[in-house]
Image (tube, rainbow, N blue to C red):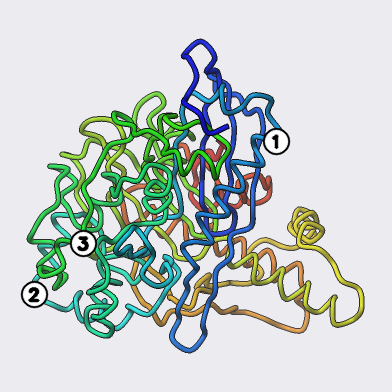
Amino acid sequence: MSGQAGTAAMRDIVIGIDAGTSVIKSVAFDTAGRQIASAARPNRYTTRAGDGAAFQPMAQTWDDCAATLRALGDQVDGLAARCAALAVTAQGDGTWLVGAGNRPVGDGWLWLDARAADIVRQLRAGAGDAERFAITGTGLNACQMGAQLAHMAAHDPDLLDAAEVALHPKDWLYLNLTGLRATDPSEGLFTFGDFRSRRYDDRVIEALGLGSRRHLLPGMIDGSQTTHPLTPEAAALTGLLAGTPVSLGYVDVVCTAMGAGILAGGPGACSIIGSTGMHMRAGRAADLRPGPARTGYVMVLPVPGMAAQMQSNMAATLNIDWILGLAADLAGELGAPVSRADLIGRIEGWLAASRPGALIYHPYISEAGERGPFVNSRARAGFTGLSAGHGFADLLRAVVEGLGMAARDCYGAMGPMPAELRLSGGAARSPGLRAILGAATGAAAASA
């Protein structure tokens, strides 16, 4: 199983890996892009209420990824010999430190981690932040590696002293697959670089107070142009063939937007309604003008000269998870446990049984607060307008409408509402949610 990759004539399958916040998944496609099979494992991470920490063991993440690839091989006859290439993406932001021997230095910090909130407030108030934002097009928030490294430098410098490189989740998996320490242009640039020149920028790094830690930044490679071979060690663990080309994908939201057709028929708009909400417009990098509030992101696309301007509300389906979790907990306490899938299956009925606009909900359920179109780590969720006449269906509708208004808020910070909106992410399968997003933005909303 861990021999050399087969001949080109045998290779009729490509594999995509996506290590998300909720699920780590590997999917096999034929060369026409049709899905053949998939395998997944729940992603496991820990949150801590006291300081807002969110982290997961790095070795566990690689083990889970490898397990999904082995499971895929169990489903597809001859997968190893038929695999032409595999590509990897993952949840964005976060900080995954690697030291000697490519071993983890502590746990991986997720984008949900709020520990850097205080230093973000300090840095945003500093003299260098306006220039940093003008170069990156990205508002500083506690999700990002730059802020998290600055927090570590101030509070746990020994951690950084033990590290040789700072990676994002997909970069960590790529290291385990190929032995190469690298990041892609989308994450490397919105954190530490210039989206126009597509290079790291020392002014950005100095503005974050990380000049002495510059050596932790890996080189950038464009996986749409360059691949590296699967190592024999990774081949043995995954059941694939050593030498199989591996592509380091752009960050998950960029991959999703490209798949949703953000550039189909010219630059367009796309919203990804997943754990977080990503709302984006594509355009020529030279034409993008990040707003004065210093929020949002600019991420380069795997097309020369093109980038996406984004605003991201911190929590999207996390709000739905929260309210469904309340229902599940109550049912369990009453001796009638109900599965998450059963509750999700009832959402359309609850939306149909409730009146639009009956309540207002602010969707700031994350302990990290909000990051777009404003940054406030202390922002919290809440209902307005509650009375004894409201029931669970009204609460559920208000939560979903809150996501619609968050999308409107985000697009409003980038300019006029889009005429057409391509929707992706798990929640985009809901007809009710699509209708609410369309009504909130005034756009023709279509699921990708």
Residue 106: where, in percent of width, then height? Answer: 40, 72
Q: Earlier in the sequence, mark 1 or mark 2?
A: 1
Q: Residues within 10 Å of mark 2 (few under 14, many from 20)?
A: few
Disc 1 marks a residue whose amino acid type is Asp
Q: Residues within 10 Å of mark 3 (few under 14, many from 20)?
A: some
Q: CA distance from mark 1 to mark 3?
A: 38 Å
Residue that label 2 marks:
127
Residue 223: where, in percent of width, then height? Answer: 33, 35
Residue found 51% across the figure and 82% down from its top = 48
Q: Earlier in the sequence, mark 1 or mark 3?
A: 1
Disc 2 marks a residue whose amino acid type is Ala
Residue 240: where, in percent of width, then height? Answer: 54, 34
Residue found 45% across the figure and 38% down from its top = 232
Secondary element under disc 2, as helix, strand or loop, is: loop
Q: CA distance from mark 1 to mark 2?
A: 56 Å
Residue that label 1 marks:
74
Residue 411: where, in percent of width, then height? Answer: 38, 52
